[in-house]
Image (tube, rainbow, N blue to C red):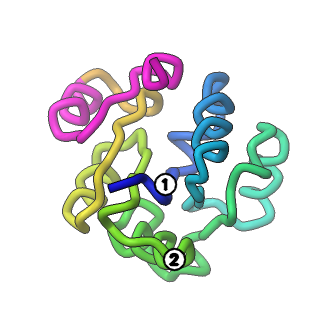
Amino acid sequence: MRLQSAVFSLEDAVLGREDVEKVLSLLKMEGVWLYAVTAMERADAERALREAGAKDYFRGVLTEREALCPADSGQMFEKAMRRLRAEHRDTVVFTGRLAALRNARAAGFRAVAVRGAADEEEWNAMRAEADEVAENYAAFLA
């Protein structure tokens, strides 16, 4: 089974992370298709991705307004996966929030807990429940 696609929670797994470009670059180089999901408005999300130098890594962005569901819901991850023409077994979700991690796993996705927005208690719970843990992306790549 090969990783075909990855869905990133934009606010907590991409934006504001100095170390994200290396993992995005490697995934893209390996032929993994990437999508971002967000609670932001489309124009704001696209601007933020451009400013972070990450826009060209993603095949698209799906917003709550467009999807008509919360950005951290299993339904949102499913909609992004379908846009990538992928299957659950070939898709991983990267998130920095416990609720999103739980929702992704409940929807049948593998999930990577990304250190970022979570406080210490939430981070400990995420580490216990995630399929993989990325304290930072450099360690994740090692």
Q: Nearer the viewer, residue 52 or 70?
A: 52
Choose top left, top right, bottom left or bottom right for residue 89.
Answer: bottom left
- Which residue occupies 35% across, 37% down? 113
The residue type indicated by label 1 comes to: Ala
What residue did someone put label 1 on?
Answer: 6
What percent of the width, then of the height, locates residue 129?
17, 40
Q: Secondary structure at mark 2?
A: loop
Q: Which residues are magenta?
A: 121-142
Choose top left, top right, bottom left or bottom right for residue 1.
Answer: bottom left
The residue type indicated by label 2 comes to: Arg
Q: Report the disc number at residue 56.
A: none
Q: Nearer the viewer, residue 125 or 56?
A: 56
Alpha carbon separation for disc pair 1 and 2: 11 Å
Count of numbered marks: 2
Left or right: 52 in relation to 120: right
What residue did someone put label 2 on?
Answer: 85
**How crowded is the residue under tag 1: few (<14 C-alpha within 10 Å), some, or many (20+)?**
many
Residue 11 in the image: above or below residue 66: above
